[in-house]
Image (tube, grey):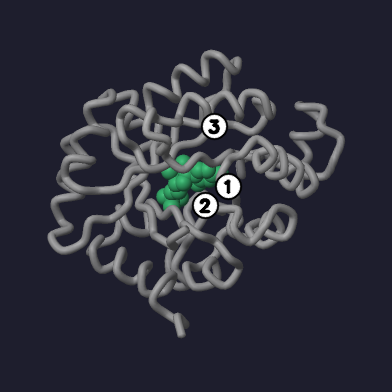
């Protein structure tokens, strides 16, 4: 599984997204389309970005009964996305159904990863509101193991959890990690953050980077810095 930097294109319109992507004349970054952009523009935004030659992580976090998820995944797969996701809380059966729906007639399919516990969920709320008695670490590990049992490729997690997930599942089990910030950059509303270089050390396969690139005065330079720190450095 190749390491890559995925840019979170958290814009509310196609126009803003294309203005941003037009800045990249040499590279074709892997981009993440989330709910905001997808709900604003519909499937056409996926097709248009794909046509421009970008790989796409469609971050819609599906969670429903297995049959509904299976059929929805089949629709998303036809959009030719490269990666998509769901909530592991939907159970192993739901994840298995998702994989079935995602697999195309020729046997190919997008990478499928699971959200374990959202990084916005604290252990206290998980225990008191969701009545999950285990620790947040044990819950994340168990959900990651469930995703592996169902045949998924990996999970979305905090870069600080990537090592724990790899230890519990396997080195090959993919970790996609948001919450990345430059050492000298602003943290914003993210709490558990780390640098691209550190995320690489811990074992992330893909880092998802939004504002440090989209809000930078020179987004292309910020993207290149991420790639350099996450992929190029310490390669030998
Ligand atoms: O701007 P920033 O780098 O914080 O963007 C991170 C992206 O990753 C956002 O699209 C956010 O929704 C997403 N994400 C996250 N934490 C998660 C899952 C997704 O920050 N646990």
Badge 2 residue CB within 8 Å of ligand 1 = no
Contact? badges 2 and 1 (CB < 8 Å): yes
For mark 3, what is the residue?
86
Q: Residue at x 50, y 68 (%)?
A: 195
224 shown above or below 64: below
Q: Secondary structure at mark 2?
A: strand
33 shown above or below 174: above
Whole-percent x, y for residue 7 in the image: 35, 52
CA distance for labels 2 and 1: 8 Å
Front residue (pair 128, 230): 230
Q: Residue at x 20, y 48 (%)?
A: 53
| Horizontal side of residue 170 vs 227, given as left or right | right
Tell us which disc is closer to us: 3 or 1. 1
CA distance for labels 3 and 1: 11 Å
Please identify the quarter of the rendering in which residue 117 is found: top right
Question: Are there few (<14), some (14-19), or many (20+) residues within 10 Å of tag 2?
Answer: many
For mark 1, what is the residue?
154
Outermost residue on the right side: it is 133
Whole-percent x, y for residue 112 in the image: 50, 39
For mark 2, what is the residue?
176
Numbered circle sitting on residue 9: none
Contact? badges 3 and 1 (CB < 8 Å): no
Tell us which disc is closer to us: 2 or 1. 1
Specify which label sits upstream in the sequence, 3 or 1.
3
């Amino acid at each position: 599984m190749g390491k890559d930097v995925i840019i979170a294109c958290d814009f509310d319109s196609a126009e803003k997204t294309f203005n941003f992507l037009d800045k990249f004349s040499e590279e074709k970054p892997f981009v993440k389309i989330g709910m905001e952009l997808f709900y604003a523009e519909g499937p056409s935004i996926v097709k248009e970005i794909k046509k421009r030659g970008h790989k796409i992580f469609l971050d819609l976090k599906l969670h429903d009964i297995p049959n509904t998820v299976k059929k929805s995944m089949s629709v998303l797969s036809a959009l030719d996305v490269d990666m998509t996701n769901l909530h592991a809380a939907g159970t192993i059966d739901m994840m298995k159904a998702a994989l079935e729906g995602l697999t195309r007639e020729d046997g190919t399919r997008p990478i499928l990863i699971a959200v374990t516990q959202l990084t916005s969920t604290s252990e206290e709320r998980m225990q008191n509101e969701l009545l999950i008695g285990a620790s947040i670490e044990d819950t994340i590990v168990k959900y990651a193991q469930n995703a592996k049992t169902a045949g998924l490729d990996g999970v979305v997690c905090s870069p600080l959890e990537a090592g724990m997930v790899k230890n519990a599942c396997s080195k090959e089990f993919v970790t996609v990690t948001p919450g990345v910030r430059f050492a000298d950059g602003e943290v914003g509303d993210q709490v558990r953050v780390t640098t691209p270089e550190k995320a690489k050390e811990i074992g992330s396969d893909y880092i998802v980077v939004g504002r440090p690139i989209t809000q930078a005065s020179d987004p292309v330079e910020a993207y290149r810095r991420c790639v350099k720190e996450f992929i190029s450095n310490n390669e030998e």
